[in-house]
Image: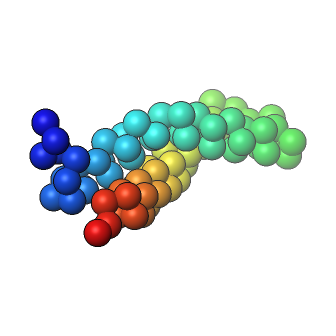
Amino acid sequence: MEIVFTKDYVYLWALAMAMALFFPVRKLIFVLYMRRAQKLVDPDEAETRRLQRRAGVTSALLCFVFSMLYSHYLFRS
């Protein structure tokens, strides 16, 4: 079991962390987008779906970059 915690599996750990962080970060970013949109105008259903997709893309990129940097820092030698 200790072989999983080696430098060879850095990409596996980065992917696992990115997947674990994706959903809470997406929800947080979506709520921030919705609050900003509600200050400007009352968003309709199409605008809500657009903001949901935008939050998904933003959180996927953010979680992937963070997890790669963190995993490489954690498993450096």
Q: Is residue 3 left or right of residue 22?
A: left
At 48% from the left and 34% from the top, the residue drawn is 23
Where does residue 2 sit, x and y in percent of width and height? 16, 41
Image quadrant in which the C terminus is located: bottom left
Q: Write the residue at 15% across / 58% down.
A: 8
Residue extending furthest toward the bottom: 77
Looking at the image, can residue 33 be seen?
A: yes
Camera-nearest residue between 64 and 32: 64
Residue 60 place in picture, x, y as percent: 44, 50
Residue 49, quarter of the rendered image: top right
Horizontal and vertical percent for residue 44? 69, 32
Q: Nearer the viewer, residue 23 or 20?
A: 20
- Give 77 or 33, whichever is nearer the viewer: 77
Q: How many marks?
A: 0
Residue 55 in the image: state x and y as whole percent.
56, 45
Q: Residue at x 58, y 34 (%)?
A: 27
Viewed as shown, does residue 10 lie left or right of 34? left
> From the viewer's perspective, is residue 67 above or below residue 23?
below
Evaluate whether residue 68 shows in this view: no
Q: Is residue 20 left or right of residue 76?
A: right
